[in-house]
Amino acid sequence: MAAHLTTIGFDADDTLWQNESFYRLTQDRFSGLLADYADRTALEARLLEAERRNLGQYGYGIKGFVLSMIETAIEVTDRKVPATVIAELLAAGQDMLRHPIELLPHAAEVVAELASRHRLVLITKGDLLDQERKLAQSGLGDLFHAVEIVSDKRRDTYADAFCRHGDGPERAMMVGNSMKSDVRPALDAGAWGVFVPHGLSWALEHAEPPTGHVRFRELPDLGGLPALVADLAR
């Protein structure tokens, strides 16, 4: 069924390198700065709602996250947030943008191994400059046939990418840590969808697994991906 698999798409954040853990650390910093105005649970709920509300305007990534933190700080303090707190939130975002890349286990060797036999396409959401920086620091850039930094991931995103850079979604596989963004829309496009959970997951990326779908697979980590690809080709 997969003998003609030619193209493998990879998500980037929390699939190839750490990402959500840095957001969690910054969110802890945010909660500490505003502890006099609201408790942690309420702050996290308000911030998540701001992020959800702002996705259509700011998109995904650190810059939108920082703006949502500032907006939430203004709201919970009834527009009285000290300038020092705003400065701290901006500094936290800049720290995130400067943070060195930490590759996840097996990422480097698996990408190198599969690149020798398949066309690899990096398909990731987020801020263009930040994602380009992370890819450059990762040392994996030269292994990808193409890089797609997109505003969102939908069925057409994968259909178009796998047609442009491969032989169509039917001969492609998408690998990622988000059921909502990486797996389900890739399956809807006709590709294989491989879920590799990260452990930390942003609430807005949650979705039910497509249990029973013939092209859905789940792995505990990237280490088992080459064997899965080989097994599907039999």
Image (cartoon, rainbow, N blue to C red):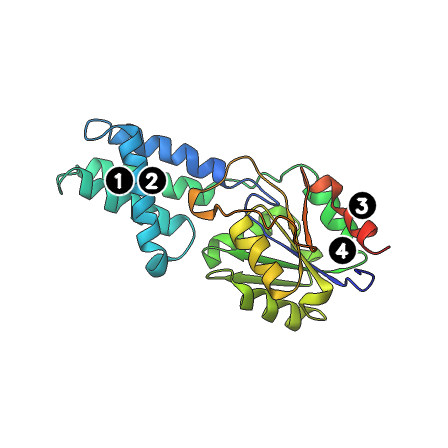
Label 1 vs 3, first from the N-terminus: 1
- Nearer to us of marks 4 and 2 is 4
* Labels 4 and 1: the sequence-earlier one: 1
Secondary structure at badge 2 equals helix
Q: In the rendering, which numbered label is found on residue 115?
A: 4
Amino acid tagged 4: Ala
Disc 2: which residue: 91
* Residue 132 seen in the figure: no
Q: Amino acid at mark 3?
A: Ala
| Residue drawn where x is 25% and y is 43% of the image | 72
Give the structural element (helix, strand or loop) at label 3.
helix
* Residue matched to label 1: 87
Q: Nearer the viewer, residue 109 or 123?
A: 123
Whole-number angstrom distance, CA of label 4 to CA of label 2: 38 Å
> Tag 4's secondary structure?
helix
- Depth check: give the residue in front, 204 or 99: 204
Give yes or no for contact between labels 1 and 3 (Cβ–Cβ under 8 Å): no
Q: Secondary structure at mark 1?
A: helix
Mark 4 vs 2, N-terminal side: 2
Q: Residue at x 42, y 54 (%)?
A: 60
Query: Which numbered tag is attached to residue 220?
Result: none
